[in-house]
Image (spheres, rainbow, N blue to C red):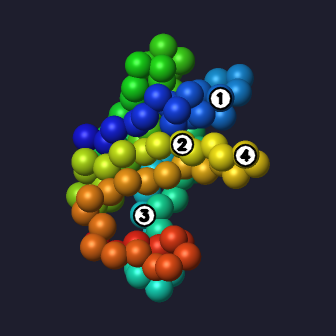
Amino acid sequence: MIHITETAAKQFVNLTGNGDNAGFRLSLTQTGCNGYSYKLEPAPIVNSSDHMFQSFEMITSGVVLVVNDADMVKLDGMTVDFIADGFNQRFNFVNSKETGNCGCGGSVSF
């Protein structure tokens, strides 16, 4: 299971705009000095093997967060949040399965 905070859910809903894209895919890419980076992108297609997650705000808007089966092993149990601090805005990923991260915050290890 992936927990989506209320602020992250509202941002997902805001990003869908007119509803043409009803989902976002969260995945891991191999990169950086620690091995992996979180990747969040539009998900116009949801595969039958994908795991789908929603919060209440997302359910009422029909928005889903999608994770493929292979990445779910490392992402299960994490929290997706959204932080807005002045002009700086970003999704924040809190994952207890991480065993390390680089100093710049660009990559993580498992």
**Image check: 1 left or right of 17?**
left
Q: Mark 4, mark 3: which one is toward the viewer?
A: 4
Identify the mark at residue 86; answer none if there is no mark: 4
Residue furthest right in the image:
87
Name the residue: 32% across, 57% down.
Answer: 95
User: Which class describes the residues within 10 Å of circle 1: few (<14), some (14-19), or many (20+)?
Assistant: few
At label 1, the amino acid type is: Asn
Residue furthest front in the image:
86
The residue labelled by disc 1 is: 14
Query: Tags 3 and 1 in contact by the CB under 8 Å rule?
Result: no
Quick one: label 4 or label 3, which is nearer the N terminus?
3
The residue labelled by disc 2 is: 82
Quadrant in which residue 43 is drawn: top right
Determine whether the residue tagged by mark 3 lies in a helix, strand or loop: strand
**Image check: 94 left or right of 40?**
left
At label 3, the amino acid type is: Leu
- Quote the CA–CA distance across marks 1 and 2: 12 Å
Query: Tags 1 and 2 in contact by the CB under 8 Å rule?
Result: no
Please indicate, yes or no, whether residue 60 appears anywhere in the rendered image.
yes
Residue nearest the viewer, comparing 9 with 88: 88
Q: Mark 3, mark 1: which one is toward the viewer?
A: 1
Residue 21 placement (x, y as % from top left): 62, 33
User: Which class describes the residues within 10 Å of circle 3: few (<14), some (14-19), or many (20+)?
Assistant: many
Q: Mark 4, mark 2: which one is toward the viewer?
A: 4
Q: Looking at the image, is 60 positioned above or below residue 65?
A: above
Identify the mark at residue 28; answer none if there is no mark: 3
- Quote the CA–CA distance across marks 2 and 3: 18 Å
